[in-house]
Amino acid sequence: MSPDMNSPIAPDAMRAESATPAPGPLQLANARLVLPGEVLLGTLSIENGVITEIREGDGVAGGAVDCGGDYVLPGLVELHTDNLERHIEPRPEVDWPHLPALVAHDAELASTGITTVFDALRTGSIHSRQVGYGAYARKLADELLAARAAGHFRISHFLHLRAEICSETLLEELAQFGPDDRVGIVSLMDHTPGQRQFRDMSALKTYVAKKRGMTDNEFAEHVAGLKSLQARLGAKHEAGAVAEAARLGAVLASHDDTTAEQVAASRANGVGFAEFPTTLEAAEACRAEGVAVMMGAPNLIRGGSHSGNVAAAELAEAGLLDIVSSDYVPAALLLAAFRLAEGWNDLPRAVACVSETPARAGGLTDRGRLETGWRGDVLRVRLAGQTPLIRGVWSRGERVS
C-alpha cells in the first residue's frame, strides 16, 4: 500500500507568504531536466515566478543560461531540521541575536538547494536541575514571521512545532499559537529515556554526558525525572497535542515510532507522515497503514543511525523510504538524493523524496516538481565524480545562491 498523501492537511491558502515582486524571465537551457519519471535534455523557462515551458533539445537561445549538460532539479523541500536551533544557540547557554541567526540559517539552506523549509521549533519545557530548558517557540515564531513578512528571507519558511510530550508546559505553549500563525506541521515527540529514539540507554548517556557533562548519578536522576514526568503527563499531552494540531489546521506527524502498535496509534491520531521510525517493523507498519516514511539524510550518508536505530539504506532497499530530511546537516539533503539514485538506479524517484513528496506531505501542492504552472523553485547541479555540486539556486525564478 502506498503512502496516503490525502491524509488531513491544511490547504495551500493557509501557507500564505509575503508577496514580493517576481523577477524577470529565466531560461535554463542545455540542461538535463529531472522531470517526474524521466530525465530530459532541454530548456526550462520561468516567468512571473512559475514554470512556463519545458522544451526538449540542446539548443541555447539568446539570453538563456547555458547549463552545459548540468542537471536541473526542483528546489528541495525540508520538513524537519534542527538547523535553526543551532544558529540560535551555537553553543550550550549561548543565546545568539535572533534576526542575524534567522538570516544566516536562511542563507545556509539556500546555499544547499533547499528552497522551502518547515522550521522546527520545540514546544514544551522542563525546569530541571540537570537539563532544564525554557519556552522559546512563541517569541522565535513571532520573529521568524516578521522577518518573512519583511522580505528578509531568500527561501520559503513555514512553522513546524515539535510537541515534546515528555515536558511540563506543552499544552500551555501550544495554546499560544492560533490559526493566523499558519502552523504547517505539529510533530508528536516523546524523548522519554528507554523507548523510541532512546531505547539504547548507553547511547543516550553518551549523548547527554558529552553535551551536558553529567556525572553517573546526575544522569540516573535525570532519567528517573523524565520517566516520572512522562508517566504523569504523557497521555494528557499526546491527546492535547493532537487536538491542538487540528485546531491549528496543521499536518500531524509522528516521531520515532518503534513498534507496529505505536504506528497504529499514530495513524488513529491522524498522522500523515512518520519522522524517523526506528525499526524495520515500524516502517513496514507505516506502509501497511498508508503513512509516509521519512528518514534522515545523515543516516543515509553515514550508513546508519547515530542512535543505533534502523539504517535509512535498509528501508530504501526494502522500498519503505518516501521522504528524506536533512535533519541536522542541511548539505546532506542533496547528497542523499544522489546516493539514493545510485542504489535505485532512478534519479527522478530519488529527487521526488526531497522535493515533491515532502511538499505534498506538508500540504503544499504548488512546488516540488518541474512542470508548467508549478512554482519556479529550481537548482542547477553538476556532478564531481559521485558528489553533486550546486551551481545555482532559484526561488520563484530569482537567484538566491
Image: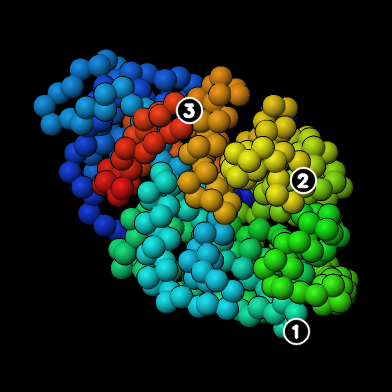
Along the line of sight, the residue nearer the viewer: 244 or 74:
74
Question: Which mark lies nearer to you, 2 or 3?
Answer: 3
User: Label 2: which residue?
Assistant: 309
Q: Distance between the residues labelled 3 and 1?
A: 48 Å
Residue 281 % position (x, y): 83, 38
Residue type at mark 2 is: Asn
The residue at 34%/60% (across/down) is 153
Cα distance between the residues tagged 1 and 2: 29 Å
| Circle number at residue 386 | 3
User: Is 192 positioned to the left or the right of 401 in the image?
Assistant: right
Check if mark 1's residue and mark 2's residue have beta carbons within 8 Å: no
Residue 187 at what x, y percent from top left?
Answer: 66, 58
The answer to whether 270 appears left or right of 9 in the picture is: right
Marks 2 and 3 close (CB-CB < 8 Å): no
Q: Which residue is drawn at 81% across and 48% down?
A: 258
Earlier residue among tags 2 and 3: 2
Which of the two discs, 3 and 1, sits closer to the camera?
3
Residue positioned 17% across, 30% down in the render? 64
For residue 318, which quarter of the picture?
Answer: top right
Can residue 393 be seen by looking at this rendering?
Answer: yes
Q: In this view, does 290 lie above or below 193?
A: above
* Residue type beneath disc 1: Arg
Residue 101 placement (x, y as % from top left) = 42, 68
C-alpha span from label 2 to label 3: 26 Å
* Classed neighbour count for the residue bearing mark 1: other residues with Cα under 10 Å, few (<14), some (14–19), many (≥20): few
- Residue sitting at x 68%, y 33%: 313
Considering the image in quadrants, where does the N terminus appear? top right
Label disc, if present, on residue 129 of the rendered structure: 1
The quadrant where residue 35 appears: top left
Residue 385 image offset from top left, x and y in percent = 44, 26
Colour scheme shown: rainbow
